[in-house]
Amino acid sequence: MSSTTAQHVEHRDDTASKLGMWLFIFTELLLFGGLFVVYSVYRYLNATAFHLAAHELDVTVGTINTVILLVSSMTIAMSTTAIQKKDKRTTLILIGITILLALGFLVNKYFEWSGKIGHGLYPGSPVLEELGRGDILFFGLYFFMTGLHALHIIVGMVLLGFVFNRVRKDKITHDNFQLLENGGLYWHLVDVIWIFLFPLFYLIT
Amino acid sequence: MTSKGSEQPAYKSYLEEDGGRKGIFRWILSTDHKRIGLLYLYSMMAWFIVGVTLGLLMKLELIAPGKTLIGPQAYNATFTVHGVIMIFLIVVPGLPAVFGNFMLPIQIGAKDVAFPKLNLFSWYIYVLGSILVIASLFGNGAPDTGWTFYAPYSFKTGTNMLPAALGAFVLGFSSILTGLNFLVTIHRMRAPGMTWMKMPLFPWTLYGTAWIQLLATPIVGITLLMVAGERILGIGFFDPAKGGDPLLYQHLFWIYSHPAVYIMILPAMGAISEIIPTFARKTIFGYRAIVLSTLAIAFVGYFVWGHHMFTAGMSGTALFTFSILTFIVAIPSAIKVFNWISTMHQGSITTEVPFLWAASFIFVFMIGGLTGLVLGALATNVHVHDTAFVVAHFHFIVFGGTGFAFFGAMHYWFPKIYGRMYDKGWARTGWLIFFIGFIGLYGPMFYLGITGMPRRYFDYLEEYHGPNIISSLGALVMITGFIIILINLIKSAREGEKAEQNPWGGTNLEWQIPSPPPLENFEEIPVIEKATYKFD
């Protein structure tokens, strides 16, 4: 052991980082799990109001966003394959497409949200106060859950941007791509949560 | 490797390795698990002194009926901030963050944790969270909701509860990352030959704890975020006026906060399981039973949250189920106590300071545990609900349990951490005064609770005066003991006698490396052949 430097020898264990990422994903699912519990309780108590309120949401916009996220999950998965084939250019393009799709999702979400807010449907609004308790809870949950999900999209974009940069600088290569894979895992998590949010708010009517 | 003399080979300890950094940067930029453990220790000590001061303030207020020192609003703020600091800043991170960080890699024969940078990052998150908690003290009034932040009061109060709740959220994040790090470390970095059933018990309890940290903390995280959303946006999840249900808040809060009690106590049990065999000179009795009971506590502890809400309004079936589960979760704890006692049976016990702490731990933990059954039984619970009895029970478990184990672990591993021995005479005196003070402080509160004195009141009827005087005097005695212990340790860390490699004759890996350990603990990763706790 050298005593000249106090720096740790960077020991690499891909299985460990993957295990760490899976455990982290587990906690993220539980974070949303708390919200799913709240949703179930209030849906049970206000079935009719939730049913009617769901009609206010635009299924088309929701479907487009679902397709966007599914495609982005595919592109990020493809990038992991591309890096293993030592194809740096395709890897970068695929990560780039994923980030752009994420941006598209957010733009879509922005118009959807501002539409709702324009109609006076936001937490604490006078319109909502008049509509009644079920609607207050539905839109409260809608904004809270999709908002938290959008926050995860942004975090995912930052993470993928970081990964993009590492690939560009050849820090992620065909024999050292765990970071890309972890970024991909996180992105799939974001996708999976949306897969649950979409039917809960848009489809169950 | 097995030399027990005071001579140690020439080497550079982790305290001397500075990584080319100067002053405080040697600490706050180091990813060495040992330095990070000490960073937690020092920050926790600072907050602990704040928490103790707030506790003392309450006890002085209660020394006589009527207002003596602080009024009702200030009293509410005091018990809230005392609770938030003690729970979220000290006992929840407690043993895992300090001794887990320091000892886990050493005890499993690793050079560091799996993610050293993430480990340091967790400490920074901890500091950020603690700053938020302390910030809540300033501005428009300290929070007065109690550490439980019960809705709907938590979003109706005009006081500054938002930073405290967000602080708790941030601290939860730190706790999750530490748990994650330990899980991966234990799974991936055990030395060759260290099978699961050869792993010492302290890492085992850290393993159980880490799962609870990972599985329970996100729930309180999202709950506190919902309360924040309630306060900022008025979304109405827990507001009856908007269709929300405050009881749902209580459920979500206790789904985390009851398992959190096991986050606090499991590593404490692990430390006790290290200390007792060493000073009884005997292999731990029922190693397998202790391991299994650890996992059982972690598992069943997840399903007992409802016993905090017996009077809040639940169906009879729910009440019954939660009550019986509460009784079931007491079984594995009792198994551990039996195992510790059996370990001592026919051992050659030396009553060194760590052993005194461990023995007194068993004593107070048993009182705390048995009074817990009084609270877990439905009928008696209704009688003592929200009285001083609950406060006494809670402090016997969390302070008497975790606190005593923390001090025990501190005195046990101190020579390893600093390479110096403390003054044993003063340590013994400090322990005795502390122990007497502790019983004097919390003992009378059982009686007060049974006779009907409610908790969280700044005032009481004249008939409760006597026991309250004893309790307040007990607080003063206990703090005297604490000061003696603290000064002794600080002084000894600087100028105590040089400690041997293995002053207690312990059998685990930490005693087979020099004191203080070198930077990467082991020159060569050891190969484990024999079971743990085997004395020659």
Image: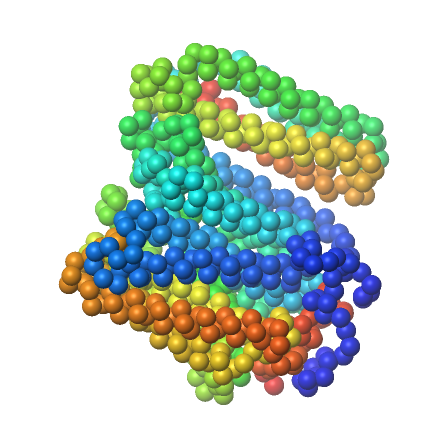
Determine whether, in the image, residue B152 is placed left or right of residue B113: left
The residue at the point 44 percent across, 53 percent down is B85
* Image location of residue B460, percent across then percent down: 20, 57
* Image location of residue B400, percent across then percent down: 39, 67
Determine whether, in the image, residue B192 is placed left or right of residue A170: left
Q: Nearer the viewer, residue B203 or B463?
A: B463
Q: Nearer the viewer, residue B401 or B281?
A: B401
Q: Nearer the viewer, residue B364 or B278?
A: B364
Name the colouring of the figure: rainbow
Question: Is residue A78 in view?
Answer: no
Quadrant of residue A161 within the rendered picture = top right
The residue at the point 38 percent across, 70 percent down is B478
Quadrant of residue B4 within the rendered picture = bottom right
Determine whether, in the image, residue B186 is placed left or right of residue B461: right
Above or below for A24 versus A150: below
Quadrant of residue B111 within the rendered picture = bottom right
The residue at the point 62 percent across, 33 percent down is A155
* Image location of residue B414, percent across then percent down: 58, 73
Above or below for A197 versus B520: above
The residue at the point 40 percent across, 47 percent down is B255
Q: How many marks?
A: 0
Q: Nearer the viewer, residue A26 or B99?
A: B99
Determine whether, in the image, residue B208 is placed left or right of residue B475: right
Quarter in which the C terminus of chain A is drawn = top left
Quarter in which the N terminus of chain A is drawn = bottom right
